[in-house]
Amino acid sequence: MNLKELYQEIILEHGKSPRNLTKIDNFNKDAKGNNPLCGDNVHVYLKLNEDKKVEDISFEGSGCAISMASASIMTDLVKGRSENEVKEIINDFLGMIKENPELSSKNLKDDERTKLMCLSGVKQYPMRVKCATLSWHTLVSAFDNNKEEVKTEN
Ligand code: ZN
């Protein structure tokens, strides 16, 4: 199996059985995102404790395999991390999807890096970039507890 096939496999697997696809009942921050071009919707629920650590995170939503896989991988990856660490990873991921060839965060283990890199295939497709980044922009909005829906289009 080459790298491209491995990446494809991870996306399909997460797309079919997304992790953390539920509404946690003890969240204290949340935000919604919408990508009308593809029909992707996501609602991120975040439980941030007093130490500014992500105690729990989940999402609800529907959309294409890329958007669901990305939300699934994201929620899996940020659980248990500090807000600062998560924000660093978000920036790293968005930078990689938009222009950087690689991820540079020191906070990622090899297998975590692989899971994020599997979304790198969308780079050449601006439409798909919106699918892959929707949940990440929505997570940023959730940290800010922004009640206005995140939109990929104005
Ligand atoms: Zn999509």
Image (tube, grey):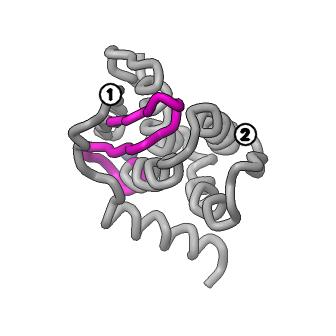
Residue found 25% across the figure and 46% down from its top: 62
Q: Which residue is mark 1?
A: 28
Residue found 39% across the figure and 23% down from its top: 150
Which numbered disc flags the more N-terminal residue, 1 or 2? Answer: 1
Left of 88 or right of it: where is 153? left
Give amino acid for label 1: Asn
**Disc 1 packing (10 Å; few <14; some 14–19; many ≥20):** some
Screen quadrant of the N terminus: bottom right
Screen quadrant of the C terminus: top left
Give amino acid for label 2: Glu
Answer yes or no: do the residues labelled 1 and 2 have beta carbons within 8 Å? Answer: no
Answer above or below: position of 67 versus 47. below
- Of 11 and 4, nearer the camera is 11
Q: Which residue is mark 2?
A: 99
Q: CA distance from mark 1 to mark 2?
A: 33 Å
Residue found 68% across the figure and 54% down from its top: 108
The kind of secondary structure element at disc 1 is loop
Residue 88 at x, y percent in the picture: 67, 36
Residue 61 at x, y percent in the picture: 26, 43
Determine if the magenta segment contains residue 16.
no
The kind of secondary structure element at disc 2 is loop
**Quarter of the image where ligand 1 sits:** top left
Left of 144 or right of it: where is 4? right
Residue furthest to the front: 50
Q: Which residues are magenta?
A: 44-67
Q: Quadrant of residue 121?
A: bottom right
